[in-house]
Structure formats: structure tokens, C-alpha cells
Amino acid sequence: MQGLANLPDSLEVVASFQKILPRESGEFVRIAPEQLQEFCGELRAVWNALEKLASENKKLVRGEAQSILHGWWRKYPLKDGPHWNVYFETGTFFPALMNWRALIARVCFDNRDKLGICKNCKKYFIKRRTDSSICLEKGCRLYDNLQRQRKHQEKKNAPRKGRERA
Ligand SMILES: [Zn+2]
């Protein structure tokens, strides 16, 4: 999901991304690159909107994020197969693997307070903790450590040589 959000907004890149995907990836590989590019744009819009709502401590999903997610969920009518698994015994339903828009909508919704945009590299990432602001890339962790050290030094008001984690 992060991979899709971080794809550059270019039809050429999206088309070559589809070519390197394994054929089992299903519809991802078969839809027109324009459609996948449009989906990636929607995913970024959802991510930006949910990140903003979470930063305001709002658990509700409204506005643009809500309308895009609802579009993904309602792309296929809710009936048993092939896009949905309906369990009549428990009165529950779940998107089938091929219904990837609804699955990604589910993941976005369930992780709505963990969708982050890295303060350093500006990439979309899933936070380990709701207050993380830096992704796990090596360069970004180093940046984060340096920021922490700087803050710590400012607090102590005395220069101190700290050790950096690799
Ligand atoms: Zn980063």
C-alpha cells in the first residue's frame, strides 16, 4: 500500500510498475495504467486527509477521505461472490482478495491514525506509533536521532558528544 502511495504521479512509471508485478497480483496488472494512476492519486488524497484528521486528534473519517473510501467500498455490490465473502451465520462480510479497492479502504480505515508522511523524506509510511513522524529509512532515522540529540543538547545547554545509532 505504501508502495502505491509513493509511486511517482507518472503514467510511464505506473505502467512499468505494473509490468514488474507478478501476474498473480490480479487486477492490479490488468487494469489500464490510467486507472491505476488515478487510484494512486486517490490513495494519496485519502492518506493526506486522514493524516491531517489524525493530527487534529479526530477519529472520524469525513470529507474527501470519506467519499473516496466509500467509492472503493461500493465499487461492487455487496453480494456473496466474487467480490465479497458473506458469512450468513455471523452476519458478517469481508472483501475477497480480488476486491483490492475495498481491502485497501479497510486497511486505510483501520489504520487511520497511523498513516504518516515522513517529516524528512516526505514519503508516505505507516507509523509504528501514532506519534511517529519519521519513517524507517536509514537516512530518516539518522536525521531523527540528530534532531533528538540537538534537542537534548539545547535542554542541557552544554555541548555533548552523543553516539549515533546506525
Ligand atoms: Zn523518511
Image: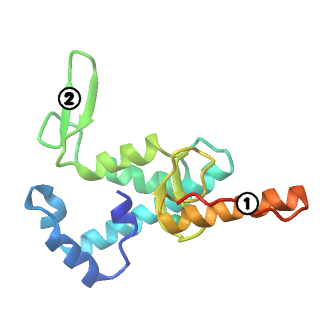
Residue occupying image coordinates x 62% and y 60%:
164
Residue occupying image coordinates x 8% and y 61%:
23
**Residue kind at label 2, given as amino acid type:** Val
Q: How many angstroms separate mark 2 from mark 1 (CA)?
A: 53 Å
Q: Name the quadrant of the N terminus.
A: bottom left
Q: Which residue is mark 1?
A: 149
The relative height of residue 88 versus residue 61 in the rendered view (above or below) is above
Residue occupying image coordinates x 17% and y 43%:
83
Q: Which residue is mark 2?
A: 86
Residue occupying image coordinates x 45% and y 54%:
67
Q: Are marks 2 and 1 in contact (CB under 8 Å)?
A: no
Residue 69 relative to residue 79: left or right: right
Q: Position of residue 12 (x, y in %)?
A: 25, 84
Instruction: Assess disc 1: are there few (<14), some (14-19) or many (≥20) residues with their C-alpha within 10 Å of its C-alpha.
Output: some
**Residue kind at label 1, given as amino acid type:** Gln
Q: Nearer the viewer, mark 2 or mark 1?
A: 1
**Quadrant of residue 13 within the rendered picture:** bottom left
Q: Nearer the viewer, residue 35 or 138?
A: 138
In this orientation, does residue 118 appear? no
Q: Position of residue 71 (x, y in %)?
A: 36, 54
Q: Position of residue 49 (x, y in %)?
A: 55, 58
* Disc 1, SS: helix
**Quadrant of residue 134 within the rendered picture:** bottom right
Tag of residue 134: none
**Quadrant of residue 150 within the rendered picture:** bottom right
